Image (cartoon, rainbow, N blue to C red):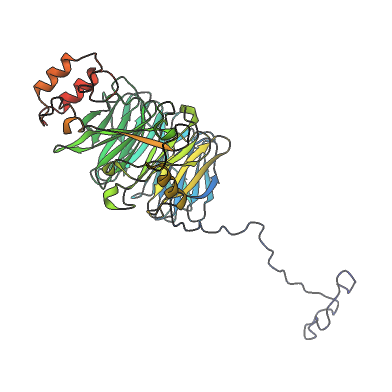
Amino acid sequence: RTSSPDFPISANAFDASYGGSPEDAFVTKLATLSSTPTPEPVPAHSCAPTALGTITVGQEPRGLAVDSPRERVYVANYGSDSVSVIDSRTNTVLKTIAGITAATGISHDPHHNIIWVTNSSTNQVTPIQANAEATAFTVLPAIAVGESPWGVTYDPIHNYIYVANSLSDSVTIIDADSRVEVTTLSGSFLRPFHLAANPVTGKVYVVNFGGPGHSVAVLNGTSVSSVVSLYDSKEPYGLAIDETRNLVYIATVEPHRIVVIGPANGRLDQFLGWAAFHRGFGNPNRPVPMRVLAVNPTIGPAGDGGHLWATTTTADGSEANQALMIPKGWTSYFNQPFAQDVGTYPADGIAIDRATNRVYVSSGFAPGSVTVIGDHATLCADVWSKIAADEPPQVSPDPDGPQIGVEIFRADETGDKAGDINGDGQVNLLDLVMAASLFGSDAPEADVNQDGTVDVIDLTIIAGNFRS
């Protein structure tokens, strides 16, 4: 109230017209600076792959889902029973939704703006309702499904939610409007972990990790329309859909391949072949096992097949934990992958925001993280230099080098037709008889899948292409 060295009264600071005491002092509160800086937008990128940052999330993150219009990325944190909500514009966590037990798989239904999360330890799937701006979230009652549910996907054509029950060998189908179970399918599944919907055709593809008959079940609505054999491609795990070309890519762990399913010979959903990956530009002693996939189908020249992204982890015997950018798809028979280091165990989460061409990879344990990588039609300069260095005759491939080579097997490459042993342009009874006569041998003309032995897998491929 009085002037002092510590709090002096400025001259003319008192309004004489005010009826109060001249000893009264009036202080205006000034706004204080915030201790938290305003997040900056993620910088634009002009080539791929470009590192765009790492986001700390909950413990042991697994599934990822992208909501492009609302600039959101959702992360299922298995280890901390939560879902992280990321603002993809700034790479910051806006909110953590707690109480989502053993959050494993995750999918976004844009029609209802609901996030679906599988609870693998409680045999449930939990819907989370977001408001229009995706700034507030309401956890809705969980729905009972099969044992150890893992993957979940939304099919906009049939308006269904599909849940892969990994330990009960089944798929639960839920009506997205009523959030009530429609049916549970079984009999065509063996340890299904991941599944994905084609938003154009309405088909849902379910990967059967279990053997010996490694396969992909094709669902249409509430029925199984077909089961596609992957032959000797064991431990199929993640998958991605290229709806623009009606192709399905499947990642396999043990034979370190990406298997492709698509149209062939006038029929849909056929086994087309695979690509195997080894470090050292094809060193067979340095395999690159694959886990989960995402595809950016419209990036780059139309004939190239877009970009494919995959993860590989040391937990499966890989030499590094990485995200791999493959600059071409099946229609151009792939290209050399280029690796970006990520956190530990990137086994279950990868997603692409096709509006911004950003790739998100979940990894780590405590805490977990999401690595953000820029995709682009233009490859970065260091990528071009690697391509130039690896092309003969400039330099011989280094079997101890970091480059990853690609080996392609096409189902139609033997005599222009897989199983056309005698080269007459047709796969017929004569080819089947010839293969049977060479059963158990290493005869290359009958070893259709090139695994070193003429066996039942080769006979199955020939029979599948009969009269093609």
Q: Residue at x 53, y 38 (%)?
A: 343
Q: Quadrant of residue 4?
A: bottom right
> Depth check: 274 or 99 in front?
274
How many numbered marks, from 0 up?
Answer: 0
Image position of 6 (left or right of 398):
right
Residue 34 location, quadrant: bottom right
**Is residue 3 positioned above or below 128 on the image?**
below
Residue found at x 27% / y 52%? 302
- Relative to residue 407, is residue 167 depicted above or below? above
Q: Is residue 337 left or right of residue 446?
A: right
Q: Foreground: 344 or 116?
A: 344
Nearer to us in this view, 237 or 392: 392
Q: Residue furthest right?
A: 5
Q: Is residue 162 visible?
A: no
Viewport quadrant of the N terminus: bottom right
Q: Residue at x 35, y 49 (%)?
A: 112
Q: What percent of the width, then of the height, locates residue 207? A: 32, 30
Q: In the rendered image, is residue 309 in sight?
A: yes
- Farthest residue, direction bottom: 17
Q: Position of residue 256 (x, y in %)?
A: 38, 30
